[in-house]
Image (spheres, helix red, strand yellow):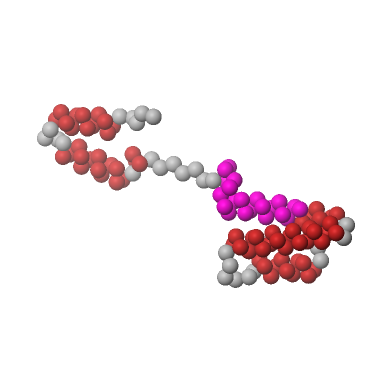
Amino acid sequence: MQSSARQALQARVIEPGRSVLERLRDLNREALGILAEARQEGQRRDAIAAIHTLHRLLELEARLLGELAHERPQVQVNVLASPEWLTIRGRLLEALRPYPEAAHAAAKVLLDEPRD
C-alpha cells in the first residue's frame, strides 16, 4: 500500500468528534478506493490486501450494528430470584395470613413452577 494511502487511513482513524461507525464507513470507502486503484494498476497483492481489509471492516460494522446473530448477547433474567419479587411475595403471603384459604390458593399459584 502506498504511504499516502496509509496516511489517509491513519488520519481517518484518529479524526475526533465523529462516531466510530462514521469513521469505520470512511475507512471502508478508503479501502474501496485502494482496491479500485490496485485493480487498475494490476497490483494483485495490494488488491488482495484491500479485499482482506474490506472483509474485516464489514465484519466489524455488522458487529456494531448487531447484525451477526451469534454475536448478540443472550440475557436471561430470573425474576423469581430477585430481591424485589421475594419482598412482594413475602408481603402478599403475610397479608393473606388471616385468610387461610386465600393464602393457600395464592401460595400454590406463586410457588408453582411456571407453565409454558
Q: Residue at x 76, y 66 (%)?
A: 6
Quadrant location of the N terminus in the rendered image: bottom right
Q: Where, by quadrant of the figure, is residue 86 drawn?
A: top left
Residues 34 and 56: in front is 34
* Residue 50 image-quadrant placement: bottom right
Q: Nearer the viewer, residue 84 or 64?
A: 64
Q: Can you give x and y, in whole percent of width and height, for residue 97 in the image?
A: 14, 35
Q: Residue at x 34, y 30 (%)?
A: 113
Residue reaching furthest to the right: 42
Give the extent of the magenta segment.
51-71
Q: Please, is residue 34 above or below residue 75 in the view?
A: below
Quarter that holds the C terminus:
top left
Q: Does residue 97 show up magenta in the picture?
A: no
Answer yes or no: is residue 46 visible: no
Q: To which quarter of the image does residue 107 belong?
A: top left
Residue 22 appearing in the image: yes
Q: Is residue 58 magenta?
A: yes
Q: Is residue 30 left or right of residue 98?
A: right
Q: Residue furthest left?
A: 98
Q: Is residue 5 above or below residue 114?
A: below
| Position of residue 99 in the picture relative to residue 111 (left or right) | left
Dominant secondary structure of the residues highlighted in magenta in the image: helix
Q: Position of residue 30 (x, y in %)?
A: 72, 63
**Residue located 76% across and 53% down the image:** 51
Q: Is residue 108 left or right of residue 51?
A: left
Q: Picture coordinates of residue 27 (x, y %)?
A: 68, 62
Could you tell whether 23 is left or right of 74 in the image?
A: right
